[in-house]
């Protein structure tokens, strides 16, 4: 009854804010998916969004659901067959007794998994494997766990398949692989490098010293080798689809199902184990977030985004790009990056936006969630995995690390936006000297190199 006494727009924003706050705080340790579904149900109950609008919002994300389901199935299959445990042991052996070297190898492994299997795979499967390994190493596991969490977002725009938010943001207009790489490869490398330095700086005391000698020689089973081959094949299929400009969700799901059934020929228990192991609550959580954003669009959210983009189009290129990235990063931490990506997608369809400005928006949506625990689906999944391991990382602890790691990575990524994606301004006076930008970027790199040198001393 209370919401019926308020203006519709205010009530919609109030329910959305309460939902995100509940997901952040988790009263009585109730899962995030419950609060997201409750928020969507309240919007429907108080007629702040119609049933037809809610169904339309849910069906818009079908490609994301396919992609998430396929990746979660592949990740669970790999976990069951010990693929990531084996990779973690390989990293431990390659570290040769150095905690810092192990951290670097874990980080590099996280980059590879995020790039090729999406950031959700890094959160779901790599995290528990790394945690189990670091417990045996008898040291502080947090540097390695935060590496998994933050690289899941920092490397999530290397490829179109690296983050479901990429599919949400661009939808059917997802750029093909080569144009994507020309635009995002250099910014992604900058974000990965800056994030590595900041985590290493934040946990420098925990990364000192030697690892204990852990005699472990884990071999990958035949089933594990078959699973790894299937994953590599799936990555190849997705890269081909991306290069051809095709949708990625359905091929991901089909590949995962085929590989699962092929594995079941060797062990009939595989299918049931995979079905039980997948975090299916992720799907209603995402669908509910889409419903919430649909209500906010009607309550002025889309208009707000359009006004922001209209103003940014009048600003100098570099200032506009940084402002767009920061704005959408802030929004992602308030509402989660998937629904904010949907707002961005709607705004892109409804207004003129240059390619560089759209790229800066995506960087904010993908990288911005490194600030808070509810910023991205990958981070929420990371928290769920840690809770299963009886390890709690508070929202405040994550925020303290995020404030160190996210801003420099975001700035560097935006500065490195590829010149192959020119900014088509309405006014010629809005451009910024490419020489000045190059000098600024060189200065940033010099400072980062000096920081690396200082850390090595």
Image (spheres, grey):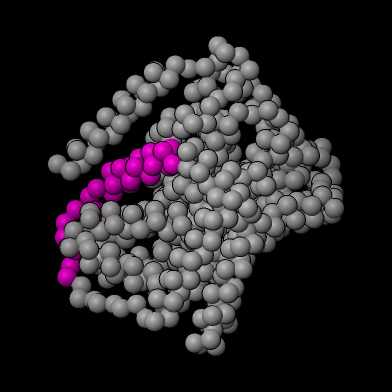
Q: Residue drawn 34% across and 72% down?
A: 86
Q: Residue drawn 48% across and 66% down?
A: 233
Q: Quadrant of residue 33?
A: bottom right
Q: Main secondary structure of the magenta part?
A: helix
Residue 339 or residue 18, whichever sits in front = 339
Q: Tell me residue 237's x, y (percent).
A: 54, 61
Spot the residue most to the left: 457
Q: Tell me residue 364's x, y (percent).
A: 52, 38
Instruction: Classify residue 40 as left or right of residue 229.
Output: right
Instruction: Classify residue 139 as left or right of residue 378.
Output: left
Residue 147 or residue 357, whichever sits in front = 357
Membership of 302 in magenta stretch: no
Q: Which residues are magenta?
A: 185-213
Is residue 28 positioned above or below 307 on the image? Answer: below
Q: Residue drawn 32% across and 58% down?
A: 106
Membership of 186 in magenta stretch: yes
Residue 233 or residue 85, whichever sits in front = 233
Instruction: Classify residue 199 as left or right of residue 284.
Output: left
Q: Residue drawn 45% across and 74% down?
A: 227
Residue 142 showing in the rendered view: no
Q: Quadrant of the C terminus?
A: top left
Q: Tell me residue 255's x, y (percent).
A: 57, 68
Is residue 445 positioned above or below 424 on the image? Answer: below
């Amino acid at each position: 009854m209370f919401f019926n006494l308020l203006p519709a727009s205010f009530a919609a924003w109030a329910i959305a804010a309460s939902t995100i706050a509940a997901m952040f705080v988790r009263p009585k340790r109730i899962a995030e998916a419950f609060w997201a579904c409750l928020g969507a149900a309240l919007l429907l109950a108080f007629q702040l969004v119609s049933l037809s609008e809610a169904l339309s919002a849910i069906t818009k994300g079908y490609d994301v659901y396919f992609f998430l389901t396929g990746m979660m199935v592949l990740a669970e299959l790999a976990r069951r067959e010990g693929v990531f445990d084996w990779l973690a042991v390989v990293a431990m052996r390659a570290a040769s007794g150095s905690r810092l070297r192990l951290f670097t190898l874990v980080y590099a492994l996280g980059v590879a998994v995020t790039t090729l299997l999406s950031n959700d795979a890094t959160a779901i499967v790599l995290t528990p494997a790394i945690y189990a390994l670091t417990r045996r190493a008898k040291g502080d596991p947090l540097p390695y766990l935060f590496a998994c969490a933050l690289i899941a977002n920092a490397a999530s725009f290397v490829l179109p398949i690296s983050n479901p938010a990429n599919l949400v943001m661009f939808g059917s207009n997802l750029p093909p692989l080569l144009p994507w790489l020309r635009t995002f490869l250099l910014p992604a490398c900058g974000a990965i490098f800056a994030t590595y330095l900041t985590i290493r700086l934040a946990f420098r005391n925990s990364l000192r010293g030697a690892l204990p000698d852990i005699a472990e020689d884990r071999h990958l089973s035949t089933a594990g080798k078959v699973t790894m081959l299937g994953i590599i094949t799936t990555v190849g299929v997705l890269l081909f689809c991306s290069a051809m400009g095709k949708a990625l969700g359905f091929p991901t799901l089909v590949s995962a199902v085929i590989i699962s059934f092929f594995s079941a020929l060797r062990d009939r228990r595989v299918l049931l184990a995979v079905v039980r192991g997948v975090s299916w609550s992720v799907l209603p959580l995402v669908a509910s977030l889409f419903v919430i954003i649909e209500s906010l669009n009607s309550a002025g959210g889309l208009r707000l985004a359009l006004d922001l983009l209209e103003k940014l189009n009048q600003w100098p290129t570099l200032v506009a790009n940084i402002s767009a990235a920061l704005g959408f990063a802030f929004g992602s931490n308030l509402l989660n990056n998937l629904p904010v990506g949907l707002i961005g997608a709607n705004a892109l369809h409804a207004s003129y936006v240059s390619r560089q400005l759209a790229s800066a928006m995506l960087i904010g949506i993908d990288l911005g969630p490194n600030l808070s625990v509810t910023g991205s689906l990958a981070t929420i999944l990371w928290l769920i995995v840690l809770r299963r391991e009886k390890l709690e990382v508070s929202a405040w602890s994550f925020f303290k690390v995020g404030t160190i790691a996210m801003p420099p990575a975001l700035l560097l990524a935006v500065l490195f936006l590829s010149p192959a994606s020119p900014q088509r301004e309405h006014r010629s006076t809005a451009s910024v000297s490419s020489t000045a930008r190059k000098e600024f970027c060189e200065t940033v790199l010099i400072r980062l190199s000096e920081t690396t040198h200082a850390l090595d001393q």
